[in-house]
Every structure is written in C-alpha cells, then in structure tokens.
Image: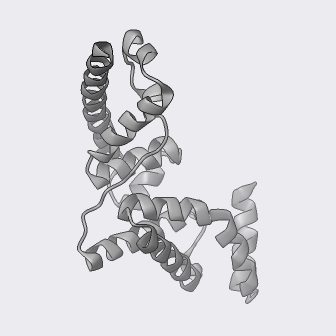
Amino acid sequence: MKNTDDQHIIDLVKKGHIQSYSILVDRYKNMIYSLCFKMIKNKEEAEEAAQDSFIKAFKNIDKFKNESKFSTWLYKVAYNTCLDSLKKINKTQHVELVESYASNHYKREDSIAGFLADDLQEQIIQNCLSQLPGDENLIITLFYFEELSIEEISEIINLKPNNIKVKLHRIRKKLALLLKDKLESNYEYLRKL
C-alpha cells in the first residue's frame, strides 16, 4: 500500500504539485536522518546531509522510474550524499547501532546473559558495533534494523548481492567475536564484585 501511495504522491509532484513532496519528507525523514547520522556520526552534519538528500531527491524525482521502492531509491540518494559529505569533511565512515543485536543474532551463554542487566548489555552491544568499520555497520543496519533485502542493499551501496551476502556473513562472525570477548570480560568483572 505504501509503495502505491508513494507513487501517487510522486506522480502529483511530477505534475507540479510540489507541496505534495512534503508528505514524502514527513514519511521518510526519520529513516533518512538515521542513516545519515549512522554514517556521519555528527548531529549537525547528519541533519544537513538529510536535508541535502531530500533536495537532491526532489530535483531528480523525474529519474525515479518505480523500478524499486521509493524508499530504496531515497536511501541510495542519502547514502551517496553522505559519502560526498564524508569526503568533504574528511572523516571516515562510522555507523552506530542502537538496537539489541545480541538478543536476535548472537547466541551467548545463559550464565553471562543472566548476569548482565539490560542497560549494560545494550552498552556492550553499542560498543562492539561502534568498533566495526562504517561500511560493515551500514550493511548490518540496513539488513537487520531497517529490514532491507539483500537486493535493496546491493542497489544502495553498489555491490552485487553475492558480495553483500559474503560481507554479511563475515560481519556476523566478527561481531560475534567482539560480543563474546566483551560479555566474558564484563562477566569476570561482575563476578569479582
């Protein structure tokens, strides 16, 4: 339903009803800002990149051919805008994930999990995720937290779907090791208390 609704709004914008574009901005502003912030890691720069993304998407709305979901196309615009911003401000890409990856995607020992409070678990997960390079964090974010398909991620970051699958597998293994080390070291620390 959302895709059909998006296309209707896009058609209105293409016909000159530019005020209709604000509906798309309202619908996707949190998603785009979140992506920008995860890549840039600076609130002001992320806000600017998100605004630039919507402006670029508006200026290029005629290039949207409905071959993918509008949100995927918009993600790609935002991703490229963030890459441009990162080049300009000469920063490396870093992505911060806030969700509880461990509860869904990492099997930890019950003794460790039972011993740590939820707050501490979330801090540990965030810390481990922040240790991953930006492109790895982005792939994890798009796949697990934004729930995009492999094909959609492939389109956004210009890698073949098989490359995304391989990277996803490697990232999971790397993240599992980071989480295991962190959880075990915190378990030992708490046990001494």
Specify the quadrant of the image occupied by residue 113.
top left
In this rendering, position of residue 57 left or right of residue 129: right
x, y percentage for residue 115?
A: 42, 15
Which quarter of the rendering shows the N terminus?
A: bottom right
Q: Residue furthest top?
A: 111
Q: Residue furthest front?
A: 193
From this view, report whether residue 39 is shown above or below residue 166. Answer: below
From this view, report whether residue 9 is shown above or below residue 162. Answer: below
Q: Nearer the viewer, residue 111 or 9?
A: 111
In this rendering, position of residue 18 left or right of residue 75: right
x, y percentage for residue 136?
A: 31, 48
In this rendering, position of residue 179 left or right of residue 155: left
Q: Residue at (59%, 81%) from the top-left corner?
A: 58
x, y percentage for residue 141?
A: 44, 47
x, y percentage for residue 13?
A: 71, 82
From this view, report whether residue 66 is shown above or below residue 138. Answer: below
Q: Residue at (57%, 73%) from the top-left corner?
A: 64
Q: Is residue 165 visible?
A: no
